Amino acid sequence: MSETTQQSTGELGTSPGGGPGGTGGATASLWRGASMLLRQRELTVFVVAVALFLYFLFSSGQVNTAFIGQTNLINLLSTIAAPIIIIALGEVMLLISGEIDLSVGFIYTLAPYIMYFTVQYYHVPPLLGIILGLVMGIVVGWLNAFLTVTLGLPSFITTLGTGFILWGIVDTTSHAEPVPIPPSTMGVGKIFSTEQLVSSTNWNSIIWAVALTVIMHLVLTRTRWGLHTVAVGGNLLAAREAGIHVNRIKYGNFMLTGLFGALVGIQVAFANNSIDPTAGQYTPMFYSVAAAVIGGTAMLGGVGTIIGAFFGSFVIALVEDGFNILGFSANPLPIIYGTAILVAMIANVQLTRLRERGSR
Amino acid sequence: MSTTASDNATDVLRVEHLSKSYGAVTALTDINLRLGKGEVLGLIGDNGAGKSTLLKILCGFQPPTSGSIFLEGREVQLKSVNHARSLGIDAVYQDLAMVNQLTVCENMFLNREKIRWPLLSTRTMRREAQKRLDEMGVRVPDVNARVAKLSGGQRQAVAVARSVFSDPKILLLDEPLAAMGVKEGTIILDLVQKLKQRGDVSIIIIAHNYGQVLDVCDRVNMIQGGQITLDKRADETSAQELTDLVVAEYRRAMEERQQQSA
Ligand SMILES: Nc1ncnc2c1ncn2[C@@H]1O[C@H](COP(=O)(O)OP(=O)(O)OP(=O)(O)O)[C@@H](O)[C@H]1O
Ligand SMILES: [Mg+2]
């Protein structure tokens, strides 16, 4: 359940503690308005993303046509942002339920190879090959859940281990060599990505990302699954005492994350028209967790929003793309990401404190 | 106060030779207990006596190591909290089982949400939660407020309100008065009275304040060392007598220990 929306609705209903009531109506309502905005963490990240967008658009003194041009927008949205967003959707659900998946980037790497091997060597129909790639993601997610939930390992360790194993599997089976997309899959591949097929109009990845964001936002805030995910991460014992199948929730979220990782891997392969053993790996996972944190998801469970992670992904993608367009060196980018994570986290921690003081 | 000296035929719940071990720790050794229809049974005993352990077995949260549970004369194996609930058993846990990150309403409906597939019927749940709380005289600032913002007593009241949602036949309350002021405690005790007058729900209430529970109980059982050591009608005992018993038991244990070490 979206914590921030609840915050605000709760605040609207109750006047006690909602500001220095009565004294100086204007300042009071101003204070209340400001604190309500601050509480809307998604809004904060949204404002940051818009500010970055405007900065890169106008920083040269006039409208930067290269930045706003179709080629760059596709690069920004489909190539850079979409993979971060889609993986972040899974990570947010996992982080809220108190777990993390470090292996998802290697699921991303392996998935298109599964498609390649099954189609090229076992002659399965192209669509089935893609589905098998996706199923592999779900199976790895299940394995992560089994080791974490059933055998009781911390998910950080579980997925560190499975990540390495997947890495080795990719390099062994592919001999660490890239391969082209099997020609027979091209037709089906259009669902995922069309960059190479219909020149430079690849909006598909970002459309997938937005659609999945909407769905996952509804799942988190409006369904039983979402509510139970928050409950499991917020208070595991209480969730169990309420009779929630806590294991089922965690298994589900691990498998969902695996599925999303595989989906991104296949999408990126089609976009690049090649399957690369160095695609994926740790970087997209770290970007996605960073996006989730920048968007207000806590690492301790019980707190997080899909929309926040969506805009958090944009912040990361905008910085990367903007630097590139303005011709800055990409070398200091990690400094910016690191700072953004820390600032977001400080804001989270401090705002929580502020909020607790205010509600007393 | 109408006490029912119920016989086996009218027992809604009967427990025989129940034991529970956590690895090397034996929490319950041999529990024999009965609960009559419409009866309120007070369960008392020291810290660590095994009261909560017994309650968590009776509500299906954990299985016993051995022993039998009979519901209305029929033996049952409580497989899960949901299973017990479907048989008409509901509980308020000592830790209250509240999720701070969720609202009052969401906590009240936790794992019994109203659904219009695939979405939650949030509005219906809010309305119903508010109605329930009003009926019970429980005051919270807002059903949409996060539970983290409630006082200890308010949380407890919400937890009790939640447990009667499903109109249980057997209600298990683990120290429902622990964090309550006199006024709030009275709300809970009044609720127990009200349920008792309706006569269709049987209640086990765990408490440390003997004086408060004796008023609503028909019968009192004391747990000591994992066994029921006392079973008396509430009007045949007093808070003083119960206190004396506990103190006497404590003294005896101390003396035994001193003799052993001597
Ligand atoms: N999950 C557990 N694992 C191991 N031992 C436990 C567990 N739960 C309870 N125990 C042990 O079982 C015994 C009984 O505990 P229980 O919580 O039932 O006591 P209680 O009568 O409810 O006490 P209190 O009045 O303090 O709530 C204690 O010795 C406790 O240490
Ligand atoms: Mg207890």
Image (spheres, rainbow, N blue to C red):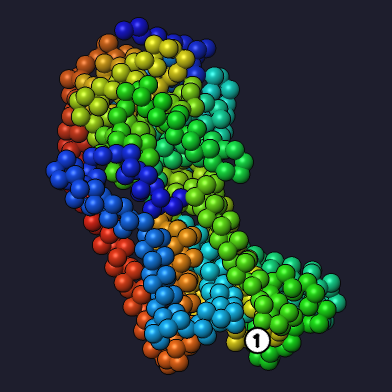
Label tally:
1
Residue type beneath disc 1? Asp
Image quadrant of residue A131? bottom right
Q: Position of residue A183 (x, y in %)?
A: 81, 82
Task: Pick the residue in front: A30 or A88.
Answer: A30
Task: Pick the residue in front: A275 or A12.
Answer: A12
Q: Is residue A61 above or below residue A92?
A: below
Q: Position of residue A250 (x, y in %)?
A: 53, 56
**Crowd class of label 1 (few under 14; some 14 to 19; many from 20; radius 10 Å):** many
Quadrant where the image shows the N terminus of chain B: top left
Task: Tell me which residue sits at (78%, 72%) in the image.
Answer: A188
Task: Tell me which residue sits at (17%, 20%) in the image.
Answer: B240
Q: Is residue A313 above or below residue B117?
A: below
Q: Judging from the image, what secondary structure is the residue with disc 1 in?
A: loop
Residue found at the very far front of the displayed protein = A62
Image quadrant of residue A346? bottom left
Image quadrant of residue B141? top left
Q: Position of residue A258 (x, y in %)?
A: 60, 67
Which chain is mark 1 on? A
Q: Position of residue B148 (x, y in %)?
A: 31, 45
Task: Pick the residue in front: A224 or B72.
Answer: A224
Q: Is residue B210 visible?
A: no
Q: Is residue A243 visible?
A: yes
Task: Tell me which residue sits at (48%, 24%) in the image.
Answer: B168
- Mark 1 sits near ligand 1, with its Cβ under 8 Å away: no
A341 vs A311, left or right, is: left
Task: Tell me which residue sits at (61%, 44%) in the image.
Answer: B118
The residue carrying mark 1 is A276
